[in-house]
């Protein structure tokens, strides 16, 4: 039995310690906002926050996060920064199919929590999740909006 | 236990149980008992039983439910997969109904004749070909107007006043003379009992009165998609459900004979059962992770197909490199797709002739949501299936055939799709629903099958590869008088049929055919080369590669004739007002045409390219600006002008053009599906490259509404981008780009 703190709630999980956190969240806890896209840390669809830091849950063994605070997209609006990110996503009409967006919102929230006013380089380094619908430029605009900065011409 | 179902395609389910289709519809729409509803007035099953002939898109009750609280539930004939169709449908229906699109809850309608609103008569229903809005615009407007007329009629009856004294304001019927008003939600119950007015009696709004059509109305699904609440097929769950994972045959057509380590697999943690299915083995478990771990550990003995040709089996010696060589070696006159004038003769009298050979690559759809399917057999003999799909009625027909159930006893739920781009049409062996159905039958519980990314890349259908040989003749003034193109390829329709049809597959050459430039002599032909590859429709289909070929070769013609590529296009479109307007619009949007190379303010050397396309009823023109950084092409800006005739939602158009541009850059810059020894080299995103955020360009969309016949939006933003970028790269490097992708080719400024 593994104890998990997810969105402020304590869960007792019956799973092998090496089970990826992603599948524990989706199957054991039945919370399906966190998405599976590749399973090998390539796409970022499965991103959650562990103690406020964005983490790809598909390659995170559940036993490694037993004592940590896990935030999934279902809990994002409990976080003041997360709430701002969601509002920016709505304001900029970011999602298309939406499948990558739980992970994108997680990545942006983690970034702004770590640095309220990220530079272009910070944004480039942090916003690396794949989006097949091509919402990259809209994501950037939303993050810049949150950071209170203008986008620099490249 | 191991069940062998690999030969058991048609499942015997016993006698069909009589069940009302209405129950499915009600459940599918989540209609709650007791709500004041305008909707589901006539159960569709009943209509069928009575032999009623349904005219698609006319029965208001099949589409709309107006609730007491004023929310409006709309059954959309088209599935939402990111293209914004649910919002567009709410705008179009809401405009004529006089109800704010923001008050709509839109869902994908169940299969059934009401929703075959594409075209006239019996119609059909697919979400594809950038056809949703343009094929149903008039029908859906009339539907909204009919519903409004019914609500007005209901108010007239209630107040005892003539209909002519009533008007509407969003969500309300108003009697100005007596200062009375009733919300639609209050009228819906009465309106339900009224007859639907004959479509031809319904008056539509004048365009000048539009309140929502043509405006950037906020999308209805954005908040749900930003908070993880949007539910896709992969998220579907029902009580008692178990999970399944599969291991596909390494090559399509092979079948599982046995599992060498079956006992060990069965003993793995969480495993419920192990199954041999057509083309795969499956493990069922309470948890997906257990199913996946076990199925991946299975050592399967595969057997080769008895008759490979009959099923388009993938042979062990197939490679994309070898196939490219076959395409390049294809010869002969081929089959004529477009023939105007006498190109062959014009070449002999031309002042100069140029030739070039172009090539494209196979591409995966790589939509981010991997395929999944949930199947549940119910106690009453009915079957529920949850599946991402672009053509519900076709899938139901196939499920009926597989199970022996009648269509009335099959409920297909089609949730939002996590990206499709052509992935979810009915392709042989490319969808997990037959597996889910067979497993649910075998284990007696609902089963959800999820394909891992690796299994998906083994069964995805690919965008075809082509090699095109061009020849052009120029006159003494350097203008093209003749163009000839021989495309060696197999179209997606030909691939699906696994044979050459009686007619040409229009999707094979579109974009090399159908060009609007005034070149008097044209000869375009296809050299059909059969492959064993599973081919599919990929965003913008033939246009995705063919406009690249043609528009890049047109730049070569310009170079040869000493013309500027923009000026040459304008010259060749001198008699085409719509396209010359569009070309000028994109030039203006980019700050005026300049080819370069030039030095940008940041010191980088840059150049621009231009290209055009006529895809899916719309017209597009693109200009791209590029530089070379560290041996890699950097695309800074893309300006794209699009003329779809008429626009419903400009913000969604801009989003679609941007998204299509991203896919266009992806295929030009990085993307290619490589096969060796009959298997894909890359099975996940570590090996299969798609555009990453750092390679994305800024995209600026300029909408030109010519008022011409309405065209598509989802796909047209793609085809002009690869050639615009490639032409810019060629301009900058002095070396023609003639193949996609650029990855693997050397580019030096
Ligand atoms: S599913 Fe975890 S990174 Fe793709
Ligand atoms: S919105 Fe579809 S993958 Fe990002």
Image: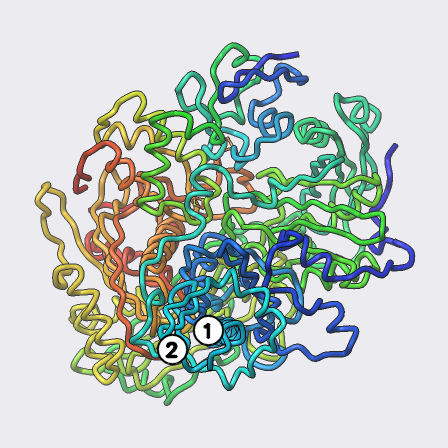
Chain bearing mark 2: B
Looking at the figure, which quarter contains the N terminus of chain B? top right
Q: Residues within 10 Å of mark 1 (few under 14, many from 20)?
A: many
Q: Which residue is mark 1?
A: B141
- Percent coordinates x, y for residue A137 in the rendering: 30, 44
Q: Are marks 2 and 1 on the same chain?
A: yes
Q: Are marks 2 and 1 in contact (CB under 8 Å)?
A: yes
Give me the residue at 34% from left, 66% from top.
B356
- Ligand 2, seen in the image, is in the quarter at top left
In which image quadrant can residue B133 be found? bottom left
Could you tell me which secondary element the residue under label 1 belongs to?
helix
Image side of residue B92 versus residue B209, left or right: right
- Percent coordinates x, y for residue B497 in the rendering: 65, 67
In which image quadrant can residue B643 be found? bottom left
Image side of residue B204 versus residue B506, left or right: left
* Image: B722 above or below B605: below
Q: Which residue is mark 2?
A: B205
Give me the residue at 75% from left, 21% from top.
B269
Chain bearing mark 1: B
Which is nearer the eye, A113 or A74?
A74
Which is nearer the eye, B652 or B625?
B652
Q: Residues within 10 Å of mark 2 (few under 14, many from 20)?
A: few
Could you tell me which secondary element the residue under label 2 belongs to?
loop
Give me the residue at 49% from left, 22% from top.
A7
Q: Residue furthest bottom?
A: B341
Mark 1 vs ligand 2: CB below 8 Å: no
Q: CA distance from mark 2 to mark 1?
A: 9 Å
Which is nearer the eye, B555 or B371?
B371
Q: Residue furthest top?
A: A67
């Amino acid at each position: 039995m593994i104890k998990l703190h997810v969105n402020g709630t304590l869960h007792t999980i019956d799973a092998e310690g090496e089970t990826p956190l992603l599948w524990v969240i989706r199957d054991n806890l039945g919370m399906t906002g966190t998405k599976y896209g590749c399973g090998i840390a390539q796409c970022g669809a499965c991103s959650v926050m562990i103690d406020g830091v964005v983490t790809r849950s598909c390659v995170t063994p559940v036993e490694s996060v037993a004592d940590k605070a896990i935030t999934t997209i279902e809990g994002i609006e409990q976080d003041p920064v997360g709430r701002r990110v969601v509002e920016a996503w709505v304001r900029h009409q970011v999602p298309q199919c939406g499948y990558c967006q739980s992970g994108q919102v997680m990545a942006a929230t983690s970034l702004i929590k770590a640095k309220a006013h990220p530079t272009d380089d910070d944004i480039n380094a942090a916003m690396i999740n794949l989006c097949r619908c091509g919402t990259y430029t809209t994501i950037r605009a939303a993050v810049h909006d949150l950071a209170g900065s203008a986008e620099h011409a490249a | 236990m191991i069940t062998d179902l690999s030969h058991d395609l048609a499942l015997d389910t016993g006698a069909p149980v009589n069940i009302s289709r209405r129950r499915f519809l009600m459940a599918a729409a989540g209609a709650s008992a007791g709500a004041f509803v305008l909707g589901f007035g006539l159960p569709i099953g009943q209509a069928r039983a009575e032999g009623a002939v349904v005219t698609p898109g006319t029965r208001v009750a099949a589409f709309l439910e107006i609730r007491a609280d004023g929310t409006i539930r709309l059954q959309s004939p088209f599935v939402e997969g990111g293209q914004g169709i649910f919002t567009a449908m709410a705008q179009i229906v809401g405009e004529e109904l006089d109800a704010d699109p923001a008050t709509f809850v839109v869902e994908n309608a169940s299969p059934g004749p009401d929703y075959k609103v594409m075209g006239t008569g019996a119609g059909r229903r697919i979400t594809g070909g950038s056809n949703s809005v343009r094929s149903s615009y008039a029908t859906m407007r009339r539907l909204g107007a009919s519903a409004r007329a019914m609500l007005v009629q209901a108010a007239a009856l209630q107040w005892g006043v003539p209909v002519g004294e009533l008007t509407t304001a969003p969500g309300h019927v108003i009697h100005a003379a007596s200062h009375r008003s009733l919300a639609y939600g209050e009228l819906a119950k009465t309106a339900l009992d009224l007859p639907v007015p004959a479509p031809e009696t319904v008056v539509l709004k004048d365009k000048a009165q539009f309140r929502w059509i043509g405006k950037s109305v906020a999308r209805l699904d954005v908040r749900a998609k930003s908070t993880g609440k949007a539910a896709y097929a992969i998220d579907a769950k029902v009580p008692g459900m178990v999970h399944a994972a599969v291991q596909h045959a390494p090559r399509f057509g092979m079948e599982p004979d046995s599992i060498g380590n079956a006992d060990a697999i069965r003993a793995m943690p969480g495993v419920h059962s192990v199954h041999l299915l057509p083309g795969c083995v499956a493990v069922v478990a309470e948890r997906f992770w257990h199913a996946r771990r076990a199925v991946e550990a299975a050592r399967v003995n595969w057997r080769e197909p008895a008759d490979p040709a009959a099923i388009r089996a993938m042979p062990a010696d197939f490679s994309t490199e070898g196939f490219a060589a076959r395409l390049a070696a294809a010869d002969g006159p081929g089959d004529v797709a477009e023939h105007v004038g006498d190109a062959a003769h014009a070449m002999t009298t031309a002042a100069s002739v140029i030739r070039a050979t172009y090539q494209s690559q196979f591409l995966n759809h790589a939509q981010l949501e991997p395929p999944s399917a949930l199947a549940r057999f119910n106690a009453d003999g009915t079957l529920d299936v949850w599946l991402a799909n672009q053509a519900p009625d076709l899938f139901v027909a196939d499920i009926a055939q597989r199970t022996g159930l009648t269509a009335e006893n099959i409920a297909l739920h089609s949730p939002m799709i996590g990206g499709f781009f052509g992935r979810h049409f009915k392709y042989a062996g490319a969808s997990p629903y037959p597996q889910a159905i067979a497993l649910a039958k075998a284990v007696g519980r609902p089963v959800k099958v999820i394909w891992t990314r690796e299994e998906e890349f083994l069964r995805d259908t690919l965008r075809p590869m082509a090699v095109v040989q061009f020849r052009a003749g120029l006159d003494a003034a350097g203008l093209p008088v003749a163009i000839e193109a021989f495309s060696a390829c197999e179209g997606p329709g030909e691939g699906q049929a696994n044979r050459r049809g009686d007619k040409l597959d229009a999707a094979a050459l579109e974009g090399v055919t159908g060009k609007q430039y005034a070149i008097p002599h044209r000869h375009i032909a296809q050299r059909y080369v059969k492959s064993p590859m599973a081919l599919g429709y990929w965003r913008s289909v033939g246009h995705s590669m063919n406009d690249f070929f043609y528009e890049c070769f047109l730049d070569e013609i310009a170079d040869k004739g000493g013309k500027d590529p923009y000026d040459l296009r304008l010259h060749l479109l001198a008699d085409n007002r719509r396209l010359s307007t569009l070309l000028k619009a994109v030039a203006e949007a980019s700050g005026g045409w300049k080819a370069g190379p030039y030095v940008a303010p940041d010191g980088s050397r840059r150049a621009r390219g231009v290209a055009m396309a006529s895809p899916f009823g719309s017209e597009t023109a693109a200009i791209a600006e590029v530089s070379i950084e560290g041996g890699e092409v950097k695309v800074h800006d893309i300006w794209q002008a699009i003329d779809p005739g008429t626009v419903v939602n400009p913000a969604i158009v801009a989003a679609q053009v941007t998204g299509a541009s991203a896919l266009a850059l992806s295929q030009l810059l990085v993307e290619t599906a490589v096969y060796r020894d009959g298997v894909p080299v890359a099975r996940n995103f570590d090996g299969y490259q798609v555009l990453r955020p750092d390679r994305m360009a800024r995209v600026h969309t300029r909408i030109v509404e010519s008022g011409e016949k309405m065209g598509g939006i989802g796909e047209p933003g793609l085809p002009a981008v690869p050639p615009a970028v490639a032409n810019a790269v060629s301009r900058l490097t002095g070396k023609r780009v003639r193949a996609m992708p650029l990855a693997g080719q050397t580019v030096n400024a």
